[in-house]
Amino acid sequence: MEFELLPLPMIYAGALFFDTHHVSDILHAWTEWRSTLTAAATTSVALMQMPPLPGVPEPIAGKFTIAVRYVFAGKPDDGARWLAPLRSVAPMLKDAVGPMPSSMIGLVHSDPEDALPATEGSALLATFDAAAAQTLLNVAGPDSDSPQLMVEIRQFGGLLSQEPEIPSALCHRDAEFGLSTVAAAPPPDLPALATHAAGEREHMSPWAHGGTLPNFASSEGQAGFATSYTAPVLERLSGLAEHFDPSHVFRMGQVPMR
């Protein structure tokens, strides 16, 4: 495997957090704004219900909020200019966007570092328009009684959507968005939360692309993992696995098998 490293020591990145009564305005504004962005920018938006636990910032702990995540691979002044329309939509609970080393990009989503019992689900979307935004609000917004800790829409495109000169195993490059759900609870409660999340994704099926991406399908078992690939790529990966690991030394339960 070969990796091309980018000369990108600094990025302009982080998240903007808005209060409950601004959720609808921000989601609809994000839906229009994201299509105006330059290729140097990428973004996601998340409906969040963070519990009042240690490590959760006080402005967002214990309430329903919406977070706009943003990364700009260019000069900070340019990044701020592209983000300005979202900053002006409504007052912010927290503005955590600014220059940072690219090695700290994980702070944009601020995922928990410690393990916790959780269930995750994902789907790919072909598009995300105003009707999709309203549907998401209906099933996962502040008035929906959704138990999900987070429901995220992540914009794709850019270089991700372009086939490289050397063929790779990454499929579904033409999906424009990813939908992710996360819920945390004691283990006995997780199956019910997973079922609820599947229902939310079903409501978004009019905009579905089909399939998943492998980094979001790791908890869905071999059958779910296989949806990350087209049939020809899955066949090629299975052949490589059989050729280089005939004794199944490195099988982890989700390697595609014939």
Image (spheres, grey):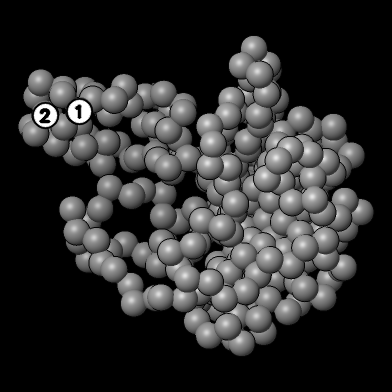
Q: Which mark is residue 250?
A: 1
Residue of label 2: 245
Q: Residue at x 63, y 24 (%)?
A: 194
State the image quarter where residue 15 is shown: bottom right
| Left or right of residue 244, residue 161 in this image | right
State the image quarter where residue 55 is shown: top right
- Say if 209 sits above or below 15 in the image: above
| Left or right of residue 26, residue 56 in this image | left
Of the image marks 1 and 2, the number of the one nearer the N terminus: 2
Q: Residue at x 53, y 85 (%)?
A: 75
- Say if 162 sits above or below 248 in the image: below
| Left or right of residue 228, residue 193 in this image | right
Crowdedness of circle 1 by 10 Å Cα count: few (<14), some, many (20+)?
few
Decide which of 104, 8 is in the foreground and name it.
104
- Say if 252 sits above or below 156 in the image: above
Q: Residue at x 61, y 87 (%)?
A: 77
Amino acid under disc 2: Asp
Q: CA distance from mark 1 to mark 2?
A: 7 Å
